[in-house]
Amino acid sequence: MSDIEVSLAHNLGDFRLEVMFSTPATGVTALFGHSGSGKTSVLRSIAGLIRADHGTVKINGEVWQEAKRFLPTHKRPLGYVFQEASLFPHLSVKQNLEYGWRQIPARERKIKFDNAVELLSIDPLLERAASRLSGGERQRVAIARALLTSPRLLLMDEPLSALDHGAKQAILPYLDESPRENRRVFSLSHATMADPSILS
């Protein structure tokens, strides 16, 4: 039996989203599809940012959504890395990282603060204002911030799409390392990519 089960049906204006899949709870899953095919809507539904008209979302047997149950986003143990890194521009990198990390009880933290900083190579950036980061730096900080919430599920909405090839190559090793912490990673990519290993 798969650990993650998703079955969704939802109307978004003239667009009808219908998706069903199951997958183990560890490793990386990439959702491929053309622009406008509903990839982001799937992630937003899993995250609880969209309440699908009909559907079921189960993570390791825990029901996040079904006919009479809908778990609010803030109660779902997940991290979400948006296509545009949504950092607090008025805070430093360190303050951005601490924002979610401090909400997690110490006994429930699955990754140490210093380990996340080292994993993403952002130690030199800690005191810098988030508004002064490059695109690649923002994405590395956003990934570290998501990991520091100790999520059971990490959702990534084309987090590398705005980066050049060099920046993508610099960040991909961190994504490869993440699932080794027994965490499930969903990433969105375009079906037209020449090299699917470069998650867009």
Image (cartoon, helix red, strand yellow):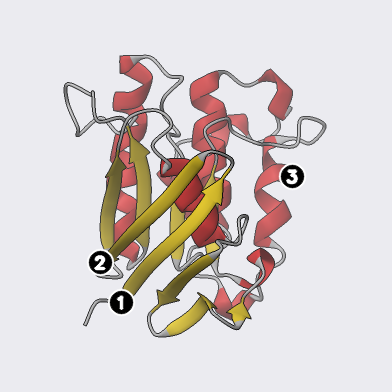
Instruction: Of the two numbered discs 3 and 1 on the same chain, state the one appearing first in sequence.
Output: 1
Q: In the figure, 147 relative to 62: above or below?
A: above
Tag in front: 3 or 2:
2
Secondary structure at badge 1 equals loop
Q: CA distance from mark 3 to mark 2?
A: 35 Å
Q: Which residue is mark 2?
A: 23
Q: Quadrant of the N terminus?
A: bottom left
Q: Quadrant of residue 130?
A: top right
Q: Position of residue 51 (x, y in %)?
A: 61, 62
Seen at 33% across and 29% down, the residue is 34
Instruction: Of the two numbered discs 3 and 2 on the same chain, state the one appearing first in sequence.
Output: 2
Residue 145: give its label.
none
Q: Position of residue 138 (x, y in %)?
A: 57, 29
Q: Quadrant of the C terminus?
A: top left
Q: Which residue is mark 3?
A: 95
Q: Quadrant of residue 149?
A: bottom right
Q: In the figure, 143 relative to 154: above or below?
A: above
Q: Which residue is mark 1?
A: 3
Seen at 43% across and 42% down, the residue is 38
Secondary structure at badge 2 equals strand
Instruction: Of the two numbered discs 2 and 1 on the same chain, state the one appearing first in sequence.
Output: 1
Secondary structure at badge 3 equals helix
Between 76 and 170, the residue placed more toward the observer is 76
The answer to whether residue 2 is left or right of residue 9 is: left
Q: Amino acid at mark 3?
A: Gln
Q: Amino acid at mark 2?
A: Thr
Seen at 19% across and 32% down, the residue is 196
Q: Position of residue 147 (x, y in %)?
A: 50, 55
Q: Quick check: marks 3 and 1 in contact, CB under 8 Å?
A: no
Q: Quick check: marks 2 and 1 in contact, CB under 8 Å?
A: yes
Between 134 and 75, the residue placed more toward the observer is 75
Q: In the figure, 128 relative to 102: above or below?
A: above
